[in-house]
């Protein structure tokens, strides 16, 4: 880390965003349960509504075009129960992913008093986010949509109108898995329905007219195929991130640089809530919540004090994209704010 002259420290400390107490007052840290979390983002809210609309559209076509008109009651009951159960679990997972705090760092805790209370030792620094006035623990990144620093942030997903982070990654994985399953199930039922209707009179295959039935089925087929591919890819990406213990942002930062494998079965169990059981697939069962941050968790040790502090953080949306961020560090010995561009 490059040492900056003392006069530069004082210049930075004169900036109002670092000194005004009303802008940097540490709030009480929320417990694992936390309060209701909802991001007021127009694009995210619209995408979440579209998600629910598409699931309900599939529900309508499956029930009123294919299953209820069918003469095979056993086939209708079995497939109706399976499809409705998967759709319920998908929407429940979506709600949990959207309304769960993904792991937001306390806003406004980057005060000089709090930094001094950490009792930093030589060779240690803490990183400060100038955008939300918070001290960033290791592996935390700032999200411009949520306007908070998120622990183990993977990306911000507009489809769930939330970041995917430490506390809600399980729900996002379940959401993608259940959407992929209902898409596959719908495609299989559409295929059987077309075969059945080709063999019999189309007027007996549905309560709707044949042209309307064909249009509804084609739209469902297109929707199912599109979301099967999309959610399967996202599911695989998230499972890979969990198994390797590397978020999407960290993977982009590393790029082609070699990395020591640090994934473990313990990380998988922490994400899904303990030892393997049916609770892994239950959106109403949470992950193993990490303990509240201790003083040492805010502190990072610098390997070489002469290294450059210029690094790059990415802030992705559904497809993570590289974007430069500003990040401030507080040095141990003088407890002064040193500006760095990240």
Image: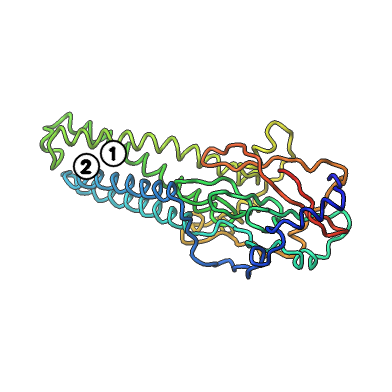
71 left or right, relative to 3: left
**Residue furthest toward the bottom?**
28
- 157 and 17: which is toward the camera: 17
Q: Is residue 29 above or below residue 170?
A: below
- 1 and 17: which is toward the camera: 17
Q: Residue 77 placed where, x, y %?
A: 25, 51
Give residue 73's mark: none
Quadrant (top left, top right, bottom left, bottom right) of the N terminus = top right
Q: Are marks 1 and 2 in contact (CB under 8 Å)?
A: yes
Q: Quadrant of residue 199?
A: top left
Q: Residue 115 placed where, x, y %?
A: 77, 63
Residue where numbered disc 2 is placed:
66
**Residue furthest toward the top?**
198
43 left or right, relative to 30: left
Query: Would residue 282 be visible to someone looking at this image?
Result: no
Query: Would residue 100 be visible to someone looking at this image?
Result: yes
Quadrant (top left, top right, bottom left, bottom right) of the C terminus = top right
Q: How crowded is the residue under tag 1: few (<14 C-alpha within 10 Å), some, or many (20+)? A: some
Q: Residue 54 placed where, x, y %?
A: 33, 44
Q: Which sits earlier in the primary sequence, circle 1 or circle 2?
A: 2
Residue at x 76% of width, y 40% of height: 310
Colour logic: rainbow
1 left or right, relative to 216: right
Residue at x 70% of width, y 40% of height: 312
Secondary structure under the numbered disc 1 in the rendered image:
helix
Distance between the alpha carbons at the discs numbered 1 and 2: 8 Å
Q: Residue 48 placed where, x, y %?
A: 40, 49
Residue where numbered disc 1 is placed:
189
Residue at x 50% of width, y 61% of height: 37
């Amino acid at each position: 880390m490059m040492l900056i002259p003392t006069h530069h420290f004082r210049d930075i400390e004169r900036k109002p965003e670092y000194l005004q107490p009303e802008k940097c007052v540490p709030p009480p840290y929320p417990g694992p349960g936390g309060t209701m979390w909802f991001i007021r983002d127009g694009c995210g809210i619209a995408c979440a509504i579209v998600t629910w609309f598409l699931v309900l559209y599939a529900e309508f076509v499956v029930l009123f075009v294919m299953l209820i008109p069918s003469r095979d009651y056993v086939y209708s009951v079995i497939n109706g129960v399976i499809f409705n159960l998967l759709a319920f679990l998908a929407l429940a997972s979506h709600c949990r992913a959207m309304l769960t705090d993904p792991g937001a760092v306390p806003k406004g805790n980057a005060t000089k008093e709090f930094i001094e209370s950490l009792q930093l030792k030589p060779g240690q620094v803490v990183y400060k986010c100038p955008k939300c006035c918070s001290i960033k623990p290791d592996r935390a990144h700032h999200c411009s949509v949520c306007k908070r620093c998120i622990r183990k942030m993977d990306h911000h997903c507009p489809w769930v109108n939330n970041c995917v982070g430490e506390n809600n990654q399980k729900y996002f994985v379940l959401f993608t898995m259940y959407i992929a399953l209902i898409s596959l199930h719908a495609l299989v039922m559409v295929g059987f329905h077309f075969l059945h209707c080709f063999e019999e009179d189309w007027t007996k295959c549905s309560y709707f007219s044949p042209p309307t039935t064909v249009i509804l089925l084609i739209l469902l087929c297109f929707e199912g195929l599109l979301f099967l591919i999309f959610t399967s890819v996202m599911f695989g990406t998230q499972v890979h991130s969990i198994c390797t213990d590397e978020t999407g942002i960290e993977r982009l930062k590393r790029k082609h640089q070699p990395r020591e494998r640090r994934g473990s079965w313990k990380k998988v169990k922490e994400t899904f809530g303990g030892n393997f059981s049916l609770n892994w697939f239950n959106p109403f069962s949470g992950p193993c919540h990490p303990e509240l941050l201790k003083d040492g968790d805010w502190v990072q040790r610098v390997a070489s004090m002469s290294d450059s502090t210029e690094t790059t953080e990415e802030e992705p949306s559904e497809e993570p994209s590289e974007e430069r961020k500003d990040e401030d560090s507080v040095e141990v010995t003088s407890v002064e704010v040193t500006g760095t561009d990240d």
